[in-house]
Amino acid sequence: MCGIFGQVGGFLDESTLDRVGQSLRHRGPDAEGRFVDAAANVFLLHRRLRIIDLSERGAQPMTNQDGSVEVIFNGEIYNHHALRRELEALGHVFRSRSDTEVLVHGWTAWGPSLVQRLDGMFAFGIWDRRTETLCLARDRIGKKPLYYSEAGALRFGSNIASLHAAGLPEGIALDGLPFYLAYGWIPPPHTFHAGVSQLAPGQMLVRTRDGAIAISTYFEPHFGEASGPPDSLPVATKRVRQLVTDAVERRLESDVPLGAFLSGGIDSTIIVGLMSKLMTQPVRTFSIGFTEDPRFDETDYARLAAQSFGCEHTEFTLEPNSFDLVETLIQHHDGPFGDSSAIPTFVVSALTRKQVTVALTGDGGDELFCGYERFLAAEAAERIPLWMRETLATASAALPPSSSDRSLFGKARRFLGASELPMADRMARWNSFFPRPRQLLRGDVAVTLGAAVDQPLAWQRQIFSHGLGHTPLSRILEHNFRTYLPNDLLVKADRTSMAHGLELRSPFLDSTLFAYVSQLPPSYLRRRTTTKWILKRAFADLLPAKIRSRGKMGFGVPLAVWFRSSLRGYLQDMLGPSARMYAYLDRARVTHLIDEHMAERADHGQRLWALLMLELWLRGRGAQSSAAEAA
C-alpha cells in the first residue's frame, strides 16, 4: 500500500521530484524510491508503506531480471502466491517475497493480459524499456485511485496534488460541478481539476512509443448473468460461507500488526468473527460512536461483538469539534467530498494506526448482498402499477414535513415523492443531494455549462441501459456497484485511511466471491423485508443473536443536530453572503435551504455539508470570484 507518481515526457529535476514525494508521503511514510531515465524522459516515484517483505528487496520502483521492466504499485495482490508459482514454472527467478514482483515478471510473460490474472486492489504503472510502452491499470472495483493528465507530458499519480507538484497548472474544471451537486462526488473520467482525469475501475491505459494513448476496459461488474440453473439454497449457503472465509484468510497475510474496524453491524461482525477463528492471537478491533444523537451510535453492538469473539477492543467518541478536520479531509480528497461519514472514518483511521498498520473492514457487504433498504424500496416500486405510483407521488405532498430524513415521515416522503419515475430517474432522485443541479446554479453558470448541467441524470440512465441484469434487483445492485460504491464508499475508505498510512482490506469485495454472489437469484439475497438473507443464513452460528436481528443503522454523522446547535454559527458564517461558492450558485436558494433547516421544516444536513465542503475547497484554492474566469 503506497503512493505512486510517474511522468513520461518533459523533464523533472530533483527539487521537483522532492515536492512530488512530499505530496505522497502520507500514503507511504516508510521510504521513497525513484527511477529516472532522462534520455527517455521517464520519471517514476514511489512512496512505500511496508506491509509484505519489509526488507529492501521489496522496495520500489522494482525491476525484472534483466532490468527491462520497471513497476510502481499501490495495493495488494491477493493471488500473488499462485501467480508466483506459475511464473517460476516458466523460468522466472524471484528475489523477494513481495507481491509487487509478480507484476514485473507477469508483464514480461503475459504483457497487458497480466491485468486479467490479478486478484486484488491495485493501481500501478509499468514502464517497458524494450518497447517504450507505459501501462497504467486500476483494479476491478476501484479500491485504489489513479489520476492522470495529458497536458504537456503524460503524468499519473495516486493523488492530484502530485500532478500539480510536478508542474501541472492548477485550474477548476467546471463541468464536474453538476455531478458534485447531484451526488457529492465526481465519477471518472471527470474531476474538479482542469486537465486531470480519473482512470475508471477496471480500466487500463497504454501509451506506446509514438505517444498514442489508448484506454480499454478489462472488467465491468454485472449481476444476474448465470447461464444455467443456480445452486440449491443449501449448496449456495455453504458456498457463500466458504468463499467469505477464504477471502478473509487471504487478507490476513501481513508482516506488520493487523486489526479490524468493527461497527457491530452484520458485515464487520462476520469479518471479525472469522478473523478470531483464523488468527492465533486476539483480534484488535476499533469502533467509533457519537454522544449527541444515539441514532448514529453503534458502540453497544460493537462492544457486544468484540466480547463475543474475545477481541482487544478500542472505542472512540466523535464530538462536533471534529469539524476542525474538514480542511484536512478536503486536501486528502483532492477536492470537496460530500459524504460526511468521512469524518468518523478519518478519526477512527488515525487512532487505529497507532496500534496496527492493516485493518480489515466490512465494506462491500451491503453492496454485494443487498443490504440497503433503498434497494428493496426500488425493487418494490417496480411492482406497483404506474397509475398507483402516480397517485402515491401526488399524495406524498400532503405528508407533514420532517426535521429528520431518518424519521418515518422523512423516508416516506422521499420514497413516495419519486415513486412514479422510471427506475433510473427514481434512483437518481433518492441518491442525490440536488437531483436537478440546474435549480441551484446561477443562470450565467448554467448557460456556460450547457449540456453538462444535465450530465448526472444522463449518466445514471446510461448505466441502467448498459446493465445486463434481467431482474429489477440485479439492475439496482449493478447500478450501485458502478456509482456509489467506487465513487463514494471506496474513495472515502482509501483517502481517510491512507491519510494516516493505514491499509484497509475488504474481503466482501473479493473477486471470486463477487463472481459467485453476483449470479445468485434475488430470492437468495432478500426475503420479503429481510436484507442479506443468504449471508445471515450462512453465518447464523457466528453472529450474536442481537446483531443478527438488528436493523440497518448506517454509518453517518448527526449533522441535522450539529448544524442546529453546536455548529449553527459556523455554518451560517461560512455560507454567508461573502461565500465564494456564490460565484457559481444561486445565493437565495442556498439561504432558503439554511432557513428551512434551522426552522426544522426539513432536514438539509447532508446537503448543507456538501455545500460547506465546496465552499471550504474554493477558499483553500484562493478561488476567483468570477464564474466565467473559473470556467
Image (cartoon, rainbow, N blue to C red):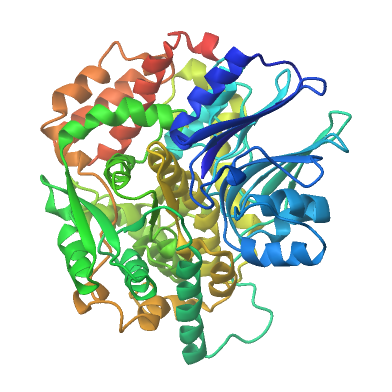
Give residue 572's position: percent from left, percent from top. 20, 21
Residue 374 vertical placement versus 547 (above, below): above
Residue lying at 40% horizontally and 63% vertically, measured from the top left: 366
- Between 2 and 490, which is closer to the camera in this rendering? 2
Is residue 109 in view from this perspective? yes
Residue lying at 26% horizontally and 75% vertically, measured from the top left: 548
Q: Is residue 124 left or right of residue 336?
A: right
- Between 171 and 272, which is closer to the camera in this rendering? 272
Say how many tags the image has. 0
Give residue 185's position: percent from left, percent from top. 46, 38
Residue 582 vertical placement versus 544 (above, below): above
- Between 534 and 1, which is closer to the camera in this rendering? 1
Q: Is residue 194 left or right of residue 523?
A: right
Give residue 487's position: percent from left, percent from top. 49, 44
Is residue 602 in view from this perspective? no
Q: Is residue 175 left or right of residue 214?
A: left
Q: Is residue 526 left or right of residue 126?
A: left
Residue lying at 58% horizontally and 65% vertically, measured from the top left: 511
- Between 230 and 87, which is closer to the camera in this rendering? 87
